[in-house]
């Protein structure tokens, strides 16, 4: 048996490469990464491909090892060379993610040390760091000092956690689900609908509150619906409002909604995944009034803090509510009991084991300070307003509501023919050009093109380029 163990050990030790091998790999990866960033301005925001990275299948998992160089070459061609380039300043579709370089360094350190940041006993410093980041976000949202939260993989998990917490706080049982009522609008993010299903609330009543002319939730209709539901023996228990809808960047009227929620004892959740960190911009503070009254808030640092995908956050005003929903003891975890100065993320989250996300948030915030983040967010607001004003000057274009954040919608209305079909062709032409990537949406059966100015590398030159591309396409169509 000893010989067998030693034989296996020899092979297993390959998983712990020597310094010389690490240095070679480090150099190759660093060269690849630097080349990617150094050439980002010359790279397209979208690359349409017939192959769509199919050749990556040639590198399926096998018994024998190969060198890193061909793997990086295939990554360049089949992963980074096709589809949307999220790191490009020309990416203005959907709600772009970020990708700040220091976050990659934080992830590298976190992956090498592999700290288990779920339990304080296992990694007290890591837990302190993540809780410190949550407390900063709570202060930013004007939450009380003892508010709590968790770093999640994104807004979808954060929205799910808020809904489950509300369900537990309201002590809803399966027999109550058919009478429970959730209030939202047609503009709510689809992750809310997924959360409802995952939380076992598919049988709950979904009450879609009408929108006003600016696509905002109507507080008057909300309260009327709550009163009617109460009179009908139903259980109003959850209101979902948005601070920055994905479609148009619209901000629901938070303060009157908060007052209604408090009056009728309904859980008030604000999905601020996209818009929340605009709180860093002082001029937007009036629009955020009322968010501090929410029972829970979803934030996505991988959107308007420009961090890599996989970085979300849920904030809960009352920490006992989060503990009620998620705290659970296990026999094999008995060593940690009574040894915690901080709440462990695993005790207030759906995740038990998770990546140490804190470093990817903390490093860029410390290395850059908050000033450039504030400036970048304010810049995005002005860039969106600039585009909104300029596109109106081009004959034939109409626009949606004036942008409150950094999303705007627009469309071309031809003098003859189907406007929806024309705009489908227009966005396809923009995407095929590839230098700028935009996405579209449908509101009340009207096809709109969206611009979402969120990527930290998007500046005036990209907006002007987009305007030039649009003008060229329109002129070509007019000349046909």
Image (cartoon, rainbow, N blue to C red):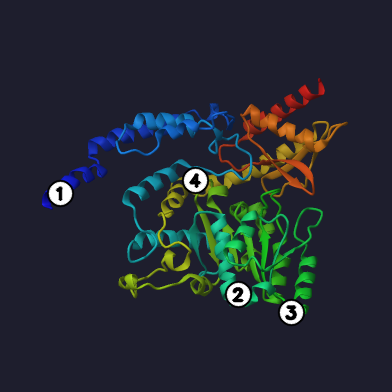
N-term-proximal mark, 3 vs 2: 2
Residue 69 as seen in the image, left or right of residue 45: left
Disc 4 from disc 3: Cα separation = 46 Å
From this viewpoint, which residue is outermost toward the right?
Answer: 415
Query: Mark 2 — residue?
Result: 174
Query: Mark 3 — residue?
Result: 233
Q: Quadrant of residue 441?
A: top right
Instruction: Determine crowd level at label 2: few under 14, some 14-19, many 20+ residues with C-alpha closer than 10 A.
Output: few
User: What x and y, as percent, mark residue 275?
Assistant: 63, 53
Q: Is residue 208 above or below residue 305?
A: below
Disc 3 from disc 2: Cα separation = 16 Å
Q: Is residue 175 above or below residue 369?
A: below
Tag 3 secondary structure: loop
Assess whether mark 1 and mark 3 are in contact (beta carbons under 8 angstroms): no
User: What x and y, as percent, mark residue 144?
Assistant: 55, 69
Number of the front mark, 2 or 4 = 2
Disc 1 from disc 4: Cα separation = 44 Å
């Amino acid at each position: 048996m000893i010989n067998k163990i030693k034989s296996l050990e020899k092979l297993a030790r390959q998983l712990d490469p020597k310094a010389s091998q690490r240095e070679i790999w480090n150099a190759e990866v660093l060269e690849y990464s630097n080349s990617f960033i150094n050439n980002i301005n010359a790279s397209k925001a979208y690359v349409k491909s017939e192959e769509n990275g199919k050749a990556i299948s040639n590198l399926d998992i096998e018994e024998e090892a190969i060198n890193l160089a061909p793997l990086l070459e295939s990554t360049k061609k089949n992963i980074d060379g096709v589809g949307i380039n999220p790191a490009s300043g020309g990416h203005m579709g959907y709600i772009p993610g970020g990708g700040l370089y220091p976050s990659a360094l934080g992830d590298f350190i976190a992956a090498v040390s592999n700290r288990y940041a779920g339990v304080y006993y296992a990694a007290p410093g890591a837990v302190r760091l993540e809780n410190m980041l949550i407390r900063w976000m709570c202060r930013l949202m004007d939450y009380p000092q003892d508010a709590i939260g968790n770093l999640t993989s994104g807004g979808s998990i954060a929205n799910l956690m808020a809904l489950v917490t509300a369900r537990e706080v309201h002590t809803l049982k399966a027999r109550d689900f058919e009478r429970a009522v959730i209030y939202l609008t047609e503009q709510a993010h689809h992750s809310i609908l997924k959360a409802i299903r995952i939380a076992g609330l598919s049988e709950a009543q979904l009450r879609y509150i009408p929108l006003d002319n600016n696509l905002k939730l109507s507080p008057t209709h909300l309260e009327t619906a709550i009163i009617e539901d109460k009179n009908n023996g139903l259980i109003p228990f959850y209101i979902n409002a948005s601070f920055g809808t994905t479609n148009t960047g619209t901000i629901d009227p938070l303060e009157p909604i908060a007052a209604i929620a408090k009056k009728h004892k309904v859980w008030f959740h604000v999905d601020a995944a996209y818009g929340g960190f605009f709180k860093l911009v002082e001029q937007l503070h009036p629009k955020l009034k009322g968010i501090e009254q929410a029972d829970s808030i979803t934030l996505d640092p991988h959107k308007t803090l420009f961090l890599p995908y996989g970085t979300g956050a849920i904030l809960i005003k009352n920490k006992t509510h989060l503990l009620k929903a998620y705290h659970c003891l296990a026999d094999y975890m008995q060593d940690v009991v009574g040894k915690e100065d901080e709440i462990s993320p695993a005790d207030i989250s759906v995740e038990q084991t998770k990546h140490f996300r804190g470093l990817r948030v903390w490093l860029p915030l410390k290395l850059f300070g908050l000033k450039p983040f504030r400036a970048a967010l304010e810049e995005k607001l002005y860039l969106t307003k600039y585009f909104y004003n300029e596109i109106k000057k081009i004959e034939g274009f109409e626009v949606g509501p004036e942008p409150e954040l950094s999303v705007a919608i627009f469309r071309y209305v031809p003098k003859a023919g189907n406007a929806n079909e024309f705009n489908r062709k227009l966005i396809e032409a923009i995407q095929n050009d590839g230098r700028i990537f935009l996405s579209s949406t449908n509101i009340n059966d009207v096809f709109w093109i969206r611009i979402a100015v969120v990527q930290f590398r998007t500046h005036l030159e990209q907006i002007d380029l987009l305007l030039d591309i649009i003008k060229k396409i329109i002129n070509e169509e007019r000349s046909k």
